[in-house]
């Protein structure tokens, strides 16, 4: 299953915490979330 950078950023913008995202998408890691945030700044 895939999740896009846009999806992760949208979840964060809606108020979800890293922990909530990781619980809902167990194949993601904290590093994946941080990579999405880094990608967004480029």
Image: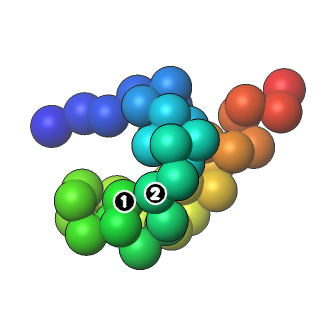
The front one of 17 and 28 is: 17
Give the vertical position of 37 relative to 19 (above or below).
Answer: above
Q: Residues within 10 Å of mark 1 (few under 14, many from 20)?
A: some
* Marking on residue 29: none
Quarter where residue 38 is shown: top right
Task: Identify which residue is drawn at 25% across, 33% down.
Answer: 2
Q: Are marks 1 and 2 in contact (CB under 8 Å)?
A: yes
- Assign the N terminus to one quadrant of the image: top left
Q: Residue 35 vs residue 33: left or right?
A: right
Give the vertical position of 20 relative to 38 (above or below).
Answer: below
Q: Residue 2 vs residue 4: left or right?
A: left
- Identify the residue position indicated by label 1 in the image: 21
Q: Alpha carbon of mark 1 to alpha carbon of mark 2: how far?
A: 7 Å
Mark 1 and mark 2 lie on one chain; the one further toward the N terminus is 2
Q: Residue 37 vs residue 4: left or right?
A: right
Q: Position of residue 16 (x, y in %)?
A: 46, 57
Q: How is the image coloured?
A: rainbow
- Identify the residue position indicated by label 2 in the image: 16
Task: Identify which residue is drawn at 71% across, 34% down.
Answer: 39
Task: Identify which residue is drawn at 52% across, 53% down.
Answer: 15
Q: Position of residue 11 (x, y in %)?
A: 45, 43
Q: Position of residue 27 (x, y in %)?
A: 24, 59
């Amino acid at each position: 299953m895939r999740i896009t950078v846009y999806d992760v950023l949208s979840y964060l913008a809606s108020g979800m915490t890293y922990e909530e995202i990781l619980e809902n998408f167990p194949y993601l890691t904290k590093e994946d979330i941080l990579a999405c945030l880094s990608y967004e700044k480029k």
